[in-house]
């Protein structure tokens, strides 16, 4: 038996190719939209993908299962558990096999046993994998968003992201039951989870790519809860706010993601096309580093730097119903990465890209540039004392609760696009986060929305603290992040 | 003034970006379909493309002028000479300016004077370029397919490729007149032609990227012709057969090439998809080296190796009305080059690509592979003596006329696809060219068409000669290539 | 805690970066010579490498531990077990910490306990890894060449590769003792071995990247042996012949590998330089596919195709005391991969590289090319019957024992370079392996050594069998591979 | 005949491969250190380099002629004109042919006539190129630094850069004589110069890659001078200050440049190695954009952004006798470009490189970062009025002469490294240039030299002007740039 793990750092997401060393048949579990990678990996192993499956309807990325099945001709095995609301919209496709608890998939000599493990979602499956050539007991389990290293899948997403009221406590109880039903298996069972640290599908997922049931039983907080009530309380507490795009992903993945046909660069555009696009309501993302954007940018563009958080903020801030343009360096692979990152979460309406030189060209053509002035903590304090500025803190709720600057207004960066009108336009606005990174994005967004004087707090709350300036401390016990 | 030449080796084609060093306005002349390169080059110069033009309706590649104008917002200046048959089908577009002899385009301080120079085609223009900042006389001329280094544009294409009877002699006379009208200009005028050595738009184009009028006047055969009659005779003699795809290009470029939106990899496919595509009538091009294809290939695929002649043979042999698949190594840039090469001549119906590993996988899945046996010259001679084989010589007419093997049947490789039925199926077929390269392609084509026993003459006619074997020598004076 | 596994497919070798999520300190275990990858991975994690270690003195690749320690300033922790013969020659360096059984390394909150596990080699260590932030028991163990997934490290290498007589049985007993001492640990302990399938450091290593002690205890043959004697017999039986370069690696890694300073392309050379190099005794490796080499190559060059087996055959066949030249395509990344592959096993004397076009250029300059004719199984049989050829079978011993062609002479490809004189020069030589791949290498080697008529059996022994031709079957029970 | 021009934008330098289409022999003229490109281009043409030459001893880059000749085995043809002081130090090498005026080189059917054209340097040669297959008169001339498009080579470099007193007027007279001797040739002679716009080897070189003698005779200022005196005055006026590294280049190229053996990345280093290197006196170049450097950098590093001016400022500011380290993004090709750029001008002592993440890691390890505050024009004015700051203007002389800020101190950026001591350390220093780009470099240099409070004028003199602030206007007629 062979196993290859594909880890997508922008999504903290794992998928698996598992195959039989003798027959070279292989299965793919939880494919994302980069379906080429699975075909290539199978070919590198001299293997054929003979079945495609997934643990559940994902909320954080567009599933590639359907396209992979179509591309390879392999049947698509989908959960038939969880009731009618969680049935896949394309479950009636000719190549779909519906999976129930207790079903079995054969991949050469590798045997896959299907276990229904609801909780994170109602239809969630776990796949027990037995290397039939060498053993008669499962070697491991692909657990999707059921059990992670150090955590379990959050049961509150449907309620919070997909807006299905009253489901989160029921989900937590289901998850408890699933754990109890699963835990009789042997200590040495390997667990191969669907996410690593950084995913919003859990609150404290560890960085280990794989773990064992015995280890988790001993050290994972979820297994240590004594009662269902204690577990339910624990699993619902302190979950981060789900990104806005999760609702769209759930819908797309249930109804049937359209095939992508490969990641494709949009056309290269020039200056005039940029001006026309901005005038026509396109959203233009300037993916340069924040420092460069702050110095000079084309007015109306939004700065989401092409770094590790690009996918996250694109998912929070970009619309699904507008044309998108990118300003990004193509020589460096950054353009292709950005195209891929956006497609991973279904942001496919790319109408064009431009080289960063367009910013100089814009000025060269006599058009004004924008800039985001930086203010120091000391100057901010003095401005606040004079009532000269509005301070907007764009950190998340738990950061805010743990301490903030007096007089600040709290609007998490993810919500900022929808709450611009709350900010008075009669004075300068200073945007602030922890380090200055998120506030740069927020400042660019406010400027693009027409606010005149938008300023960034250089170094953010950390700089404020480092300068020894006073803060509002939490009165109650702070929530854990 | 600045000038940048873009040379596309697969087409032996040149286009030009010429701009004003002061205002940074620029013009593009004879854009091919890789329009990104002009936008990028302009940006690298800090310039804006303010007008797009072309010398004539091209026959050997899809014009990028229309897409470039759309992408940049620049007006498109097109010939309005040559009569109604040669009017662009999209000359009525809002952004089109129609050009007549004597018109003038201003690109910052650079002045472009339009000269009608028919012959190669009726609507052909030449652009005289004056660096107005430094001089009051033209520095050079973009001559398109009017004057090349060492040759002139062939006037027989319309008749031979586009099947417009009776035009080639009239064209030759027009060309003579255009030359006479042009030659009063100063010796030091630089000439920037539209093709270099290897293009089928002339018969003896030199390898120099640029030349001067004075030099050509002295050393170009066309300027040395004493009379119109001598010139007409000379220019029509010995022109190579135009590739079959030229007719399609003429049509597309006149009627209006569709925008491409960038070169795009098709989806990656696997084994089963290949089998389905072959069954469904798709044309599958295996672009591996001929030696690899000869050893083992998927039956039904055609071998056009991804080397310098790829575009040429793709243009001769591939249909415009079928899906195309490519077997080619993606790690190496070869896939992206092949996609680009095909798009350059309008072969856009790419339905997918496969890694060369698919050949092993095909065998691994228990399906039979094909191979092309190689025969030596000595063995071929003995087989011919026994009447055991049919020998097909796929070289071009002039090569055949200069000598061939007795008993061979001559079918130029370009025509082979349409003449497969002439070859008897009751015995083995040996395919032969000069070196073994074209015959490999031809052999793959015959095998894909279902001939059972197709063999390649290793080393071709050169090997036959090197072995000292007898040939049929030309009886009359051989034509010059 | 975070863990990153680096898998080097050409060596089937794994190394690990393990770090503390809180302090961002990290350790590297079993670094190979691509030390940049560890520095880059640490940086990507925002971590610092604070200690470098390895499980044992490696025989199959040049260790990168010493260079990595020098490059990062981290201390180097090396085994001090195994007695004076197995002490590192550079153990006295200022930055070296000597490790004994029971020692402990702290990497932030991660605790590493050192266990002496001799058998594969006398000084071998295993590292137990405890995530101190979350647990008080080890999560896993980096086992090096002690326990693999499905196998254990072979104890016969020192005797066979490093020529240290009488050590293999003693090693096997030590290994038994190490296993017994290790097996009391919990089932759920993860095992992170130093090799995957394909390494010559074991005979049946599985393809799983990681396993658990509980699983191996149940399903690994080594744990199922009932007695020491049964284990010793089992572990010494059927081990493959170790490559010749292993002896050099052992020496280099013990005495102290020189720093490489990064993988570096040698200069590009041309035709004349190639001729001079060949004349001067340099070894020229033509890394093109075998089919291309067979058609035409520069006489005197050896064909080792740049595929997955490149490192293996380079290690078997190339000398450490001669200049090496490579003929390889640089556009495709193949050159840089080949440079890296060779450096991984210490083949650093690269004097230059040439593009494959040099083969055409060689002919263009009027110099003769070589070729390797291919013979079919049927023709080979007839030639053997007429006594016209010598047949050399270059497969390994167990393949030979399982069946071969009557009249063949068996010389494993790895030994061929040293046994060329055994082959008569008065007739043609046909080289044969299983599929035609190894025999192509062997044929090129014989041709480079001056044999006149070297022929390859197309398709190898498989083709012979497929043609239904008679073989010599094994009389006794065949050995398992 | 074929001709390929190689243009190196960082040096605005052109070299040429010219060859015979029949024999495929080729010559290289004025090779730079990227010798691989000539070998590759020759191979792409199916040609062999049979002679290597250069027009003169270059001052602005390390010559690659000697290495190219060694690598290809081609003879090296070097000027033997100009007297003993300008004889090549390696003219006695076995493969060197010494060239005198009137000599001739044969490259297949291409004939190269040698003309001595002193002025720019005493030994300068021009090569007249005749395509013997097609013509009996030269088609063009490789003019090196004799005649450019729109300018002539400056005759003052030896005096100014190499410090050879009293040569510049003599050189100007020689250049006049060379022009007079050359100008009888035909109008249509193409000129292929050694530099394009942007080179410091002339003052007004045009952007055209090639020109003709007829055109230059009409429109080049140098040909329009009526008398020798007028010409000498004209050619010596307004020449820019030559970069400091020119002296080193002259010496290296005359004495014999060492072979490079290809551009090679130095080892990747980490945080601790950077600290050690800084402590040990290495020069660390942070090649990130100025905006990023201004926000945060490792103290002691110098900012030379990896843009089009990188080579220029590296040549002005970096020492030849110290180890160099680079902080630069390797994923993006920028590292390899920087390595190449530095090697082009002989800065080979690269001891290592670091990823930009090292800046974060530096802070993460608890070490302080530096930053360059930005000041606005308005704030600068107020600071100047209060006498709170020293203002250093780092533009060049002619920019300063055309207008500057009152109270500023003028030290051209090129001289800044040697004049740091002139700047008082008791107050803040504001550095200013035209746009803010050069001043960023200058500010980083002052900070690296230990000045405490170094500030950059954002937007430079342009911003000052745009703000309508008063300047000191030139009293006399300003010099032309």
Image (cartoon, coloured by chain):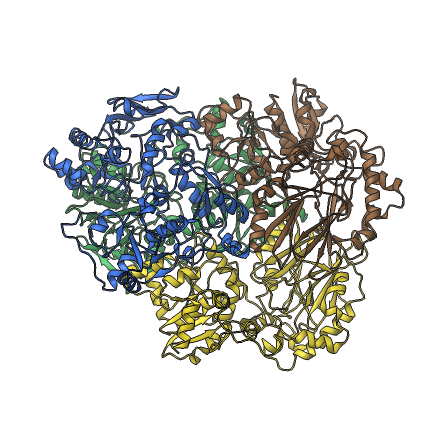
Chain colours: A brown, B blue, C yellow, D green
For the question of whether residue C241 can be seen, the reply is yes
Q: Nearer the viewer, residue A262 or D247?
A: A262
For the question of whether residue C348 can be seen, the reply is no
Residue C327 quadrant: bottom left
Q: Is residue A292 left or right of residue B24?
A: right
In the rendered image, the vertical position of residue A302 relative to residue D178, given as above or below: above
Residue farthest along the top direction in this orientation: A426
Q: Residue at x 76, y 28 (%)?
A: A406
Quick one: quadrant of the N terminus of chain A? bottom right
Instruction: Count every numbered label the image shows and give the total.
Output: 0
Q: Position of residue B351 (x, y in %)?
A: 49, 40
Q: Nearer the viewer, residue C387 or A346?
A: C387
Q: Is residue C479 left or right of residue D244?
A: right
Q: Position of residue A32 (x, y in %)?
A: 63, 42
Residue farthest along the bottom direction in this orientation: C166
Q: Position of residue C252 (x, y in %)?
A: 56, 71
Q: Nearer the viewer, residue D471 or C149?
A: C149
Residue farthest along the front direction in this orientation: B426
Q: Is residue D459 left or right of residue D127?
A: right
Q: Position of residue C204 (x, y in %)?
A: 64, 67
In the rendered image, the vertical position of residue A389 relative to residue D446, given as above or below: above
Q: Nearer the viewer, residue B384 or A200?
A: B384
In the rendered image, the vertical position of residue B337 relative to residue B247, given as above or below: below
Residue farthest along the left direction in this orientation: B226
Quick one: quadrant of the C terminus of chain A? top right
């Amino acid at each position: 038996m062979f196993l290859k793990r594909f880890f997508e750092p922008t999504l903290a997401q794992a998928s698996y190719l598992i195959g039989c060393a003798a027959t070279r048949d292989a299965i793919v579990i939880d494919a994302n939209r980069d379906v080429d990678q699975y075909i290539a990996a199978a070919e590198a192993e001299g293997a054929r993908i003979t079945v495609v499956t997934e643990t559940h309807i994902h909320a954080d990325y567009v599933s590639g299962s359907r396209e992979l099945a179509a591309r390879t001709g392999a049947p698509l095995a989908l959960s038939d558990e969880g009731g009618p609301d969680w049935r896949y919209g394309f479950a009636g496709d000719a190549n779909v096999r519906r999976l129930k608890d207790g079903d079995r998939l054969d991949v050469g000599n590798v045997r896959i046993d299907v276990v229904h493990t609801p909780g994170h979602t109602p239809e969630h499956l776990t796949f027990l994998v037995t290397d039939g050539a060498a053993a008669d007991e499962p070697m491991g389990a692909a657990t999707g968003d059921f059990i992670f290293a150090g955590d379990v899948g959050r049961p509150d997403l449907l309620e919070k992201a997909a807006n299905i009221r009253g489901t989160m406590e029921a989900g937590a109880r289901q998850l408890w039951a699933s754990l109890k039903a699963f835990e009789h298996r042997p200590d040495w069972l390997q667990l191969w989870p669907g996410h690593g640290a950084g995913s919003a599908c859990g609150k404290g997922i560890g960085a280990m790519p794989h773990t064992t049931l015995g280890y988790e039983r001993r050290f994972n907080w979820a297994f240590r809860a004594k009662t269902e009530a204690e577990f339910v309380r624990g699993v619902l507490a302190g979950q981060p706010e789900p990104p806005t795009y999760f609702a769209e992903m759930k819908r797309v993945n249930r109804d049937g993601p359209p095939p992508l046909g490969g990641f494709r660069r949009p056309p290269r555009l020039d200056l005039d096309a940029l001006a026309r696009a901005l005038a026509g309501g396109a959203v233009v993302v300037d993916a340069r580093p924040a420092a460069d954007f702050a110095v000079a940018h084309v007015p109306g563009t939004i700065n989401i730097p092409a770094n590790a958080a690009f996918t996250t903020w694109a998912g929070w801030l970009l619309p699904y119903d507008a044309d998108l343009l990118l300003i990004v360096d193509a020589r460096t692979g950054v353009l292709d990465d950005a195209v891929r990152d956006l497609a991973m979460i279904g942001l496919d309406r790319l109408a064009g890209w431009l080289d960063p030189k367009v910013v100089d060209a814009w000025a060269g053509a006599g058009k004004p540039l924008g800039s985001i002035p930086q203010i120091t903590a000391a100057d901010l304090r003095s401005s606040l004392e004079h009532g000269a500025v509005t301070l907007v803190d764009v950190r998340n709720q738990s950061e805010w609760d743990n301490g903030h600057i007096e007089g600040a207004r709290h609007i998490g960066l993810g919500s900022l696009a929808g709450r611009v009108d709350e900010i008075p336009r009669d004075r300068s606005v200073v945007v602030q986060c922890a380090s200055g990174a998120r506030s740069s994005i927020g400042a660019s967004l406010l400027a693009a929305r027409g606010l005149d004087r938008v300023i960034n707090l250089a170094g953010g709350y950390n700089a404020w603290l480092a300068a020894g300036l006073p803060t509002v401390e939490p009165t109650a016990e702070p929530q854990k992040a």
